[in-house]
Amino acid sequence: MNKKSLNNHLLIAMPHLKDTIFNKSVILICDHNKEGTMGFITNKPIIKNKISDELFEKFIKKFKNNIYFGGPVSIETCYIIHDNKYALNDSNNISNQLLFTSTKQIVKDIEKGCGPKKFKFHMGYAGWTSGQIEEEIKNGDWLAIPNPKNFIFDISDEEKWLYAINKLGIDLQDYWSTISGQA
């Protein structure tokens, strides 16, 4: 992997990553620099019946199916990926079409109907130290592709992982047939 920026790329978990967090995850990289990498898991909505916190229950009811597990780091913090039709001074560019913001103001604006039209809340983020993600890609744990237009908001969560794999031209039947094991 060269030193090219992975900003606005998708990391696609390879089938052998079986841990509960990253199994079949698709991660949108928002910041990749010499200090490390930050991204959000885009295809793992938080399931309403698994949440016990009463305040969070109200939040989920209000924002319906737009709340996601963004990753294991800072899960108490909400980050909102949204369209470029809305921006605050502290919004961060991911691409020309996508930003992320983590302030109370964006939540208030969404509630009032004057926030972004397309958005997803992410609780926490996925993060790697300097050079760590490059090593994991080199080891075959992840594949990276440029983020296809409209992927974040228009591809269903259930389809995201397979859609991204197919963008690479990988036939999973071929992948599995080349792996041997011992019984």
Image (spheres, rainbow, N blue to C red):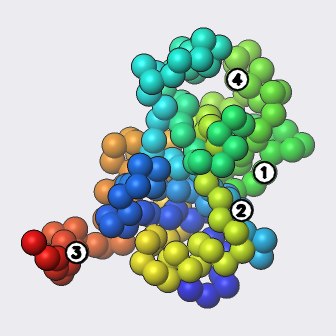
Mark closer to the observer (3, 4): 3
Residue 80 visible? The answer is no
Mark 2 vs 1: CB contact within 8 A = yes
Give the residue type at disc 4: Ile
Mark 1 vs 4: CB contact within 8 A = no
Q: Residues within 10 Å of mark 1 (few under 14, many from 20)?
A: some
The numbered mark, 2 or 3, whose residue comes first in the sequence reads 2
**Which residue sits furthest left?**
183
Q: Distance from label 3 to label 4 (Cα)?
A: 43 Å
Disc 1: which residue: 92
Q: Distance from label 2 to label 1 (Cα)?
A: 9 Å
Residue 31 has which mark? 2
State whether residue 163 is above or below residue 3. Answer: above
Q: Residue at x 45, y 24 (%)?
A: 50
Give the residue type at disc 2: Asp
Residue 39 visible? The answer is yes
The numbered mark, 1 or 3, whose residue comes first in the sequence reads 1
Q: Position of residue 31 (x, y in %)?
A: 71, 62
Disc 3: which residue: 175
